[in-house]
């Protein structure tokens, strides 16, 4: 089994992709007894099944068995084809590890995955803490110092609550990294006790990033790409208001735009490949843009490659200049 990789997808609606993972061979006893894929097994259990130390080393080196920690293994599964399957396998590995480390709970990015929140930089290692500080030099384990927050069971695993997990991610990885899960947590009503938890985090490293991520969180943003565009615009001093309903002259609904530039007749559409999954989607989108332009809007489209190339600010400023020349700066 390989480290899971939940990378931010350039064009997917959910901002995640499965990446390229090799399908491991199934794990079978030399006598024909198949081991259950994905199941945690102890050294004692494997020995009882006839797998001595030499056999365990052979299975680990071939990728059919994975050593999670001292005395605990997982049988390799087929490479996951979906984010849901990747998440399940990651949490299964976390559960096997936590069973060998009593009183531990998932924190930071691992807690975000348990809470089903997206991440800009998803982990391969398991991030853990416990009330008595955890000291671990195990490969694939990141030990975090405990701090005051609540812990709750999620899918059978003790997990840091969502707001605290967002705070840790933002503090350790930066404002945008925290904003990605924060937007989804806000949409799901999971951002609770933010002031108290920020006070509990105190003046630890990254506290300014944590405060910024929670202050900027907006549940109306519907994808990781939208979050990234809003953040890139904010860095340029441009405010984007999400999910604008556009009506025609008679008050009829025309479109729901991803963003409007505050104070200007500029609509921002964030395009991912998943947006045009069916025949006719692209044609319908072009007709929709024509309707918006007829109603006095300038439409600018931003894709992941524009974010990666640092072009968001320039694209928005060009659209603002064009709209202001046509309609004036305060027409929105």
Image (cartoon, helix red, strand yellow):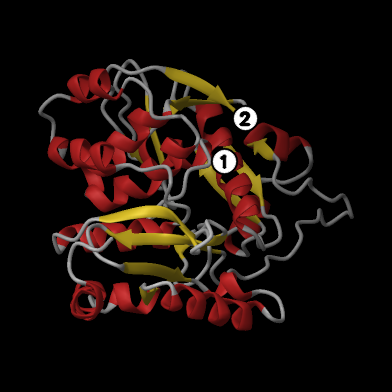
**Quadrant (top left, top right, bottom left, bottom right) of the C terminus:** bottom left
Identify which residue is drawn at 52% across, 56% down: 251
Give the labeled residue for mark 2: 155
Q: Residues within 10 Å of mark 1 (few under 14, many from 20)?
A: many
| Residue 246 x, y percent position in the rendering | 46, 60
| Residue 321 x, y percent position in the rendering | 18, 78
- Horizontal arrangement in the rendering, residue 173 relative to residue 27 (left or right): left
| Residue 223 x, y percent position in the rendering | 46, 56
- Considering every residue shown, the one lying at the far right of the view is 32
Q: Residues within 10 Å of mark 2 (few under 14, many from 20)?
A: few
- Horizontal arrangement in the rendering, residue 20 relative to residue 305 (left or right): right
Give the labeled residue for mark 1: 91
Q: How many marks?
A: 2
Q: Are marks 2 and 1 in contact (CB under 8 Å)?
A: yes
Q: Which residue is nearer to you in this view: 82 or 156?
A: 82
Observer-side mark, 2 or 1, equals 2
- Horizontal arrangement in the rendering, residue 286 relative to residue 172 (left or right): right
Identify which residue is drawn at 61% across, 75% down: 276
Residue 323 in the image: above or below residue 258: below
- Would residue 138 be seen by someone viewing this image from the given angle? no
Distance between mark 2 and mark 1 Cα atoms: 9 Å
Identify which residue is drawn at 58% across, 48% down: 87
Q: Secondary structure at mark 1?
A: helix
The image quadrant of residue 80 is: bottom right
């Amino acid at each position: 089994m390989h480290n899971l990789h939940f990378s931010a997808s350039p064009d997917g609606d959910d901002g995640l992709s499965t990446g390229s993972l090799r399908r491991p061979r199934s794990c079978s006893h030399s006598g024909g007894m198949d081991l259950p894929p994905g199941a945690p097994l102890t050294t004692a259990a494997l020995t009882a099944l006839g797998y001595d130390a030499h056999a365990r080393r052979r299975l680990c080196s071939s990728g059919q068995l994975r050593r999670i920690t001292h005395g605990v293994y997982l049988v390799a599964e087929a490479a996951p084809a979906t984010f849901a399957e990747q998440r399940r396998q990651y949490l299964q590995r976390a559960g096997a590890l936590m069973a060998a480390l009593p009183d531990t709970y998932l924190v930071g990015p691992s807690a975000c995955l348990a809470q089903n929140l997206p991440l800009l930089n998803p982990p391969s290692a398991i991030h853990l803490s416990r009330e008595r500080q955890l000291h671990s030099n195990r490969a694939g384990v990141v030990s975090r110092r405990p701090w005051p927050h609540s812990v709750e069971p999620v899918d059978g695993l003790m997990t840091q609550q969502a707001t605290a997990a967002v705070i840790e991610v933002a503090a350790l990885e930066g404002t945008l990294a925290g904003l990605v899960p924060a937007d989804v947590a806000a949409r799901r009503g999971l951002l609770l006790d933010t002031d108290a938890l920020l006070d509990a985090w105190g003046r630890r490293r990254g506290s300014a990033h944590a405060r910024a991520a929670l202050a900027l969180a907006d549940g109306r943003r519907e994808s990781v790409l939208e979050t990234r565009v809003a953040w890139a615009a904010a860095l340029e001093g441009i405010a984007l208001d999400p999910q604008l309903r556009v009506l025609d002259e008679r008050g009829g609904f025309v479109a729901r735009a991803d963003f409007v530039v505050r104070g200007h007749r500029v609509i921002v559409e964030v395009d991912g490949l998943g947006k045009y999954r069916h025949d006719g989607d692209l044609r319908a989108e072009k007709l929709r843009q024509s309707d918006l332009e007829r109603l006095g809007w300038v439409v600018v489209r931003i894709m992941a490659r524009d974010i990666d190339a640092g072009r968001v600010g320039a694209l928005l400023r060009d659209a603002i200049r064009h709209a202001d020349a046509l309609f004036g700066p305060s027409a929105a």
